Image (cartoon, rainbow, N blue to C red):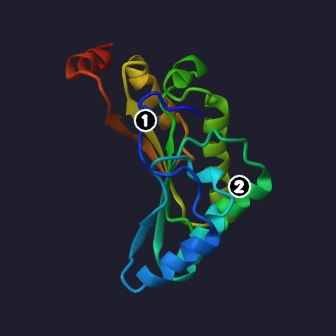
Amino acid sequence: MFCPTGRNENEFPKGFVSYENFKKIFNKIKPYAKCIFLYNWGEPFLNRDLLRIVSLCASNGISTYLDSNLSVREFNRKEVDLIVRSGLTSLKACIDGCTQATYEKYRVGGNFNRAFGNLKNLQQWKKRIGVQTPNIQWKFLVNAYNEHELLDAVRLAAKVQDIDDPSLTVKRFRTSMTRLRNTFKR
């Protein structure tokens, strides 16, 4: 996937932190850490060591937070189970649209049905096995491509009772308040 807001000009080297390198860093910060945010500058689920990293944090009483587009691949049952049982504290699903046409304008190369399906499967499995975490939320970044779907997103979230926070996390991104107000007047 490609995020159109990024100009691919950051000076950070590209790649993933390995479990071994994370563990070296983790052992140094462990006495001081209360929570770790495992996202930014990329999709967390592309890192094959992600769930081992989450489990390491959880086994040491440290909360972990992820934001993901959930569109990398369709999670199979085993992956869904591993994610839910990993000890992850919070997962925000960044799904910025209610249709494929709108979603792919911002999440270029993304798949709305896959992302929303993964979101629902994770929450349903969590509910089925009776665990409290991860807390699962739908994060909807309002932008010029999707602001006309904001009410649809609110309605869709209200219908999907399996999401922990059906109210959405709505973030305004490069849109005017006038356009947002006009969306709510419909």
Task: Say which element carries label 2.
Answer: helix
Q: Residue 75 location in percent, x, y?
A: 73, 47
Tell me the residue at 63%/38% (across/down): 71
Instruction: Point out residue 56 in the picture as x, y percentages from the top left corner.
Output: 58, 76
| Vertical comparison of 23 with 176: above or below | below
Where 107 falls versus 21 (above or below)? above
Which percent across, then down, holds residue 35? 41, 70
Circle number at residue 140? 1
Q: How many marks?
A: 2
Type of the residue with mark 2:
Val
Q: Is residue 148 left or right of residue 100?
A: left
Query: Residue 80 got which mark?
Result: 2
Helix, strand or loop at mark 1: strand
Quarter that holds the N terminus: top right
Q: Residues within 10 Å of mark 2 (few under 14, many from 20)?
A: many
Residue at horizontal 60%, vertical 43%?
70
Q: Earlier in the sequence, mark 2 or mark 1?
A: 2
Please indicate, yes or no, whether residue 86 appears anywhere in the rendered image: no
Amino acid type of disc 1? Answer: Phe
